[in-house]
Image: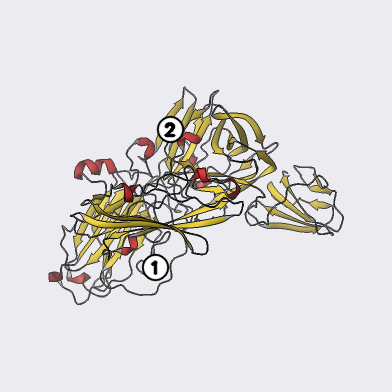
Amino acid sequence: MVGLMVLCTTAAMAQEMLVPAGRWQQRPAAAKSATSVNLPFFDDFSDYRGTPDGDLWAIGGAYVGVDYGLLPPTVGVMTLDALDANGFLYPQASTSPFPADTAMSLPIRLDGLDDIDSVVMSFYYLPGGSGAHPWETVGDTPDAQDSLFLDFYSSADSTWHTVWSRGGTSAARLRQETGHDWQYVAIPITDSSYLDSLFRFRFRNHCSLEYNGKAGMMGNVDQWNIDYVMIDSRRTVDSIGVFRDITFVKPAPTMLRYYRAMPARQYRNSDMAQRLQMTIANLYSSPIASYYSYNILDSNGTVLYTYDGGYQNAPAQGYQIEAMHAAPPVGYAFEVSDNKRAYTIVHNAREGATGDEHPCNDTVRYQQVFSDYYAYDDGTAENGYGLTSTADTVSLAYRFDLNVSDTLSAIDLAFNRTFEGANESILFYLTVWQAENGKPGTIIYRDSDTRLPLLPDSAALDDEGGAFHRYVLDHSVVVSGSIFVGIKQVGNEFINIGFDRSFNSADRIYHRTAMEWEQSILSGSLMLRPCFGQAATIGIETLEPPTSQMTLYPNPADRQVTLGGIDAASLVTLYDMQGRRMLDTKGNTVATDDLPDGMYIVKIVTRAGALHTKKLIIRH
């Protein structure tokens, strides 16, 4: 596990650490409308996310996303790693090499061709763990015993044949050998046993876990990123540079200065960015005149604003540097309103007036959300973040700046799955600090009598496919100005919080394991989102603040809990923290003998129709 990073940041007490991580779960497979594929076969993974396209690929476990590959040929890559199609470590995962993902194509029609037709398969690859600096490393580098394979299928002998493989290595070593980050591979398909209607190819990988002293660090490892997969005739093996393609390389950015998402009532015009950073590449061996523009659309699809960047020359096999395309100004400010809303920003870049060979990578979109939460992250973790210490407690705090006073009611957290759920037993207090002199100061909220367990395997998927678990506070807190939201961890095990590498908010992350708060030096964003207003737990109706008329005791409860301030005809429902209905009853007492230890939401509907909600802890 070469990609593990350990950085000392406090004299002899603390270590701020990054470990490999991965997605939680993929989208459902796309419906297949074809049973075979005609030439050309092409997929650059630029216009979809999740499961590989079902019109090109059959089975696997590989994942398509936009964040693992560092400056890929085109935006979006296919990643093979140690996670299955549901985002869990494979059951056979161990410290010895084990077979993991497979990305297999549908049958490709090569019948009617022969060796003079010059059929060539090509692709780019990049091992995980790449980055310009150690603190910017994305993913995990495959070790020497790990491998990536390419196999061809021959129907003549019903056998898969390995035609290319690569042992584990680092992107830095490959760069020294070739002068390139992404490595280009081209393989001629000349054997007659492949030139039929049943030809297939597949990528597969072998991974190995590495124990690093704390089981909570053992998670997804050994990524291989693949891009720009092409099979066609009339090609040469040395065809790099002949792709006439203007393409986006990075996903669309937020239009806000500091956040990817904000609560609707907190947004002000001053929160808009001044310029956007767009990464556009020309893959061709000669300069190409390219055109760039972006549109801002409301939720009804109405165009609110258009930016026209005109035509600019893109350098040969390089990145666009002209500011009108690479750093377009933000000439628009969103509406200031308390209403939740979302906007879609559509960016377009193409060759000249007619476009180029592959228009699928000419458009990127960003959904600008104004809801009830702040977010620095994009919903995808490329690494896991945690603190280790010789001290008994460690604290982690994340800064958020409010424009107006608001009610903090919940915190969304995303935790990475680890080997055999090693981090599920770690306990912590949710904590909120008022900012003082730019650092966490006075504690204004902390869980009073409970420590919340991590529930990474049971968290529900959010709209981005990520696994945020919503922790509702014991009581809402009115906050204003700058605050820090985070956790005080009990013990010094590795907690493994999701860490997004695509947006850098390190200057807002602080940790403390000794006497002083220290600012993070790791480039990225914690997957921690404070939620304001009336917060809803996963799968449960919106919760109203507790009322003084309704009481619940004892809390924690063992065999029974008594409800005061309600009538005997009230309907009582208990939900666990995953939103599952655990018990329905009526009256002022609830038997809790058969319910497992944990935290619950008690929802009471009185005969008059009033709704009350309370938190209940059951501890036998």
Query: In which quadrant will I find the C terminus?
Result: top right
Residue 247 location, quadrant: bottom left
Q: CA distance from mark 2 to mark 1?
A: 41 Å
Q: Amino acid at mark 1?
A: Gly
In the picture, residue 226 is in which quadrant?
A: bottom left
Counting residues from the start of the chain, the first of labels 2 and 1 encountered is 1
Residue 233 place in picture, x, y as percent: 19, 69
Residue 70 location (% of width, % of height): 33, 47
Q: Is residue 554 left or right of residue 107?
A: right
Q: Which residue is mark 1?
A: 54
User: Regarding mark 2 in the picture, which secondary structure is present there?
Assistant: loop
**Residue at horizontal 36%, vertical 75%?**
34
Q: Is residue 415 left or right of residue 122?
A: right
Q: Residue furthest bottom?
A: 112
Label 1 secondary element: loop
Viewer-proximal residue among 408 and 537: 408
Q: Nearer the viewer, mark 2 or mark 1?
A: 2
Q: In this view of the protein, can residue 146 be seen by the observer?
A: no
Name the residue beneath numbered marker 2: 521
For residue 228, which quarter of the picture? bottom left
Mark 1 is surrounded, within 10 Å at the Cα level, by few (under 14), some (14 to 19) or many (20 or more) other residues, namely: some
Q: Where is residue 269 shown, x and y percent of the image?
A: 52, 46
On-image quarter of the N terminus: top left
Q: Is residue 578 above or below residue 301?
A: above
Rate crowding at label 2 as few (under 14), some (14 to 19) or many (20 or more) other CA atoms within 10 Å.
some
For the question of whether residue 216 can be seen, the reply is yes
- Residue at the spot x=50%, y=35% of the render? 509
* Amino acid type indicated by mark 2: Ile
Give the percent coordinates (x, y) of residue 81.
38, 52
Number of numbered tags placed on the structure image: 2
The answer to whether mark 2 and mark 1 are in CB contact below 8 A is no
Q: Against 104, is 315 above or below?
A: above
